[in-house]
Structures are given as structure tokens and as C-alpha cells.
Image (tube, grey):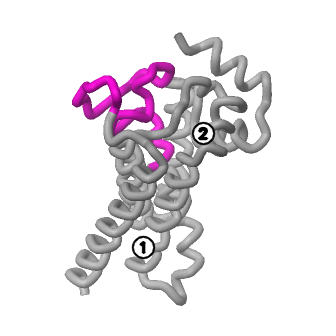
Amino acid sequence: MKTETASFRLVVCTLMVIVQMLALRAAGQPWFCRCGSGAVWSGNVVSSHNSQHLLDPYALTHVLHGVALAGLLWLLRGCCTPAWRFALASLLEAAWEILENSPIVIERYRTATISRDYYGDSVINSIGDLGACMAGFLLAERLGLKRSLLLFAIVELLLLFWIRDCLTLNVVMLLSPVEAIRDWQASGLH
């Protein structure tokens, strides 16, 4: 049974990556950072490198996507196996990545948040975000509810102190921007 689950997850991961890559390339997103750097990590969230390399601080918000999706999809445990819940979480995250890189959402980020120079993710960054979500889902499945909630809170606080942003603020600023939050975020980033 474990082999079937592992095989199923591998197939799902592969399909999600392929669909996501094709959709982002069709939308005109670059494969990698246009700077030509092969760096895996970019830690500066106010540079042109943000969202262009495999990983950046926002990858942690995608880990939290996975944790949250594991919690929500746990409600389907009576009718869906863990492998199917993983597949659904992967599908939802890939769909979000495609939507996040659509012109309307990119423009919303640029006008409503501190991400004035955001032009969307590179394909490699978007795939990294999908991988981070999958890792978060699998981690939450292992940790259980209480420890997953603790992890969620710790990561949110870490991101708040580190980059003055987190998943919660990201959602608030995207849906209903608060000028005081934007000012606070901007005052700490150089």
C-alpha cells in the first residue's frame, strides 16, 4: 500500500509540475531569473530577484498553504485517502500558482501591497512554491492538528519579524488593503 501511495504521489507531483510549467510559459513567465544568476535562493524581498529563484522567504508561506490545505482536506478523510487529499492539495496549489501569475492578480499585488515591482514568478520559483506546499501538506499529515497549528503560528511570527510579511498579511493586503499595514511593511524594508 505504501508503494502505491508513493507512486501515486509521484505521478501527481509530476503532472502538476508539467501543467503548471506549461501554463506559466504560455502566460509569458520566464523560466529563471532574467539576471542570469543560477542562485537557488534569494533572500531580499524588495529586489528584482524576489520570486525569480527556486526559493525565497515567501516559500515559507507556501509551506503554510500545504499545512492549511492538509487541515481543510482532513475533513474529507471519510471519503478520500491521504494520497487523494495530497493530490487535491497539489491541484489547488498549482491552480493558485497559475492564478497568482495572471495579469489581474499580478496587477493587484502591484497596486495593493508593498510588491510594487512584482511581475509574477519565474517558472522555477512557482515550481518551488508548489514543492513547498506539498512539503507543508506532508509535514502537517505527520504532525497532526495541534503541532501543525503551532508550526503555522511560529512560521507566521518568524516571517513577520524577518520580512514584515506573512501569509495572513499577504491575504489581508491582497483582498482588503490596509494603508497602515503597507506603511509599516515599507518602513522596515530597505
Q: Is residue 50 above or below residue 32?
A: above
**Element under label 1?**
helix
Q: Residue at x 54, y 30 (%)?
A: 118
- CA separation in Å, label 2 and label 1: 26 Å
Q: Residue at x 69, y 18 (%)?
A: 184
Q: Which residue is mark 2?
A: 106
Q: Residue at x 26, y 34 (%)?
A: 40
| Amino acid tagged 2 | Ile
| Amino acid tagged 1 | Ala
Q: Is residue 107 magenta?
A: no
Instruction: Name which quarter of the figure residue 20 lies in.
Output: bottom left
Instruction: Name which quarter of the figure residue 137 lies in.
Output: bottom left
Q: Earlier in the sequence, mark 2 or mark 1?
A: 1
Q: Which residue is mark 1?
A: 87
**Element under label 2?**
helix
Decide: few, some or many residues near mark 2? Use Cα within 10 Å; few <14, some 14-19, many ≥20. some
Q: Residue at x 37, y 55 (%)?
A: 21
Where residue 121 appears, as percent x and y from the top left, is 45, 40
Where residue 131 appears, as percent x and y from the top left, is 35, 54
Question: Closest to the observer: 33 or 55?
Answer: 33
The chief SS type of the magenta part is: loop
Looking at the rendered image, the disc whose residue lies closer to the viewer, 2 or 1, is 2
Decide: few, some or many residues near mark 1? Use Cα within 10 Å; few <14, some 14-19, many ≥20. many
Q: Which residues are magenta?
A: 33-62
Q: Is residue 104 above or below residue 139?
A: above
Q: Is 119 situated left or right of 176 in this image?
A: left
